[in-house]
Image (cartoon, grey):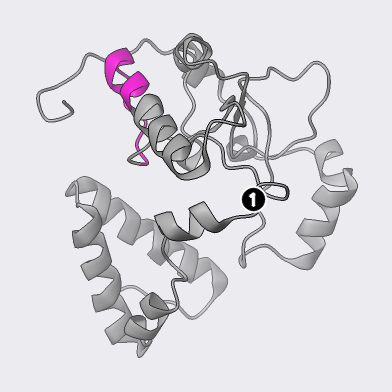
Amino acid sequence: PLTVTSDAERRTTWNALRAYAASRRMSAEEKSNLVARVAVTLGVNYTEIVAQGTLQVMSPESVRALPADLIDVQLHTHRHRTPRNRELFEREIKDNALLIRELRGDANPLEQFCYPSGEYFGEFFDWLRECDVRYATTCVPDLASRETDPMLVPRFIDTMAQSDTTFEAWASGFAALLPRRAEYQLDPARLAMEPEPATASQR
């Protein structure tokens, strides 16, 4: 049994479900089915949530309709994965760039990238530069400065789980001055890791 009474229990349960899905290498459809089963257990109308588009990426039509003078669409990995094999990684970027240009045209250069789920590794930097990427954003909160590595631009993710106090602390810059847990700092080990060879399943 997994409990969801307190915030701490909900975080523990969420981590357990995420680990369960990862250990079984679930597809997107299988993950969606898992969430639907959890929703039934909790008495949540998952069908209504899906119908509202809350848990979905934007449709191609919605992306195409975005006002170009207000919103700039930039790069991600196309399949929301970060393969640590150079050929597969570059294919993700190129596939994503092709679709963005198809939807948005060629007027704006595609030179910014956001690591899926913040999964950054040192070998990505040269690969990104060869794809004409100038800036890459992590999920590690901090204040950017002139000394910030452009391949490790910090980002504070404002979700429903963040309290108003936490948001205000980061928006003001105060939180960057406080000691932080390891998960809120760049990991030197990630920057030093060697790339992995591609497997048949990854290809």
Q: Quadrant of the N terminus?
A: bottom left
Q: In this view, which residue lies farthest toward the left?
A: 200
Q: Is residue 64 above or below residue 3?
A: above
Going by the picture, which residue comes out furthest to the bottom?
A: 43
Q: Please rate how many residues cluster around mark 1, counting C-alpha atoms within 10 Å: few if below 14, some from 14 to 19, many from 20.
A: some
Residue sitting at 21 percent across and 47 percent down?
A: 23
Classify mark 1: helix, strand or loop: loop
Point out the stretch of residues depicted in magenta: 80-91
Q: Is residue 21 magenta?
A: no
Q: Amino acid at mark 1?
A: Ile
Residue 134: image quadrant is top right
Quadrant of the rendered image containing residue 84: top left
| Image quarter in which the C terminus is found | top left
Q: Is residue 92 left or right of residue 136?
A: left
Q: Which residue is mark 1?
A: 157
Vertical relation: 193 (above or below) 19: above
Residue 89: in magenta span: yes
Where does residue 160 sit, x and y in percent of width and height? Answer: 62, 67
Q: Nearer the viewer, residue 83 or 39?
A: 83
Judged left or right of residue 2, residue 4 is right
Q: Would you place residue 171 above or below residue 74 in this image?
A: below
The image shows residue 80 at horizontal and vertical percentages of 37, 41
Counting the numbered discs, the total is 1
Q: Give the side of residue 13 with respect to residue 87, left or right.
A: right
Residue at point 27%, 76% (across, down): 36
Which x, y percent locates residue 131?
Answer: 47, 16
Residue toward you, 11 or 51 = 51
Measuring from the top left, give residue 55's x and y in whole percent.
Answer: 43, 66
Residue beneath the point at 40% across and 27% down: 93
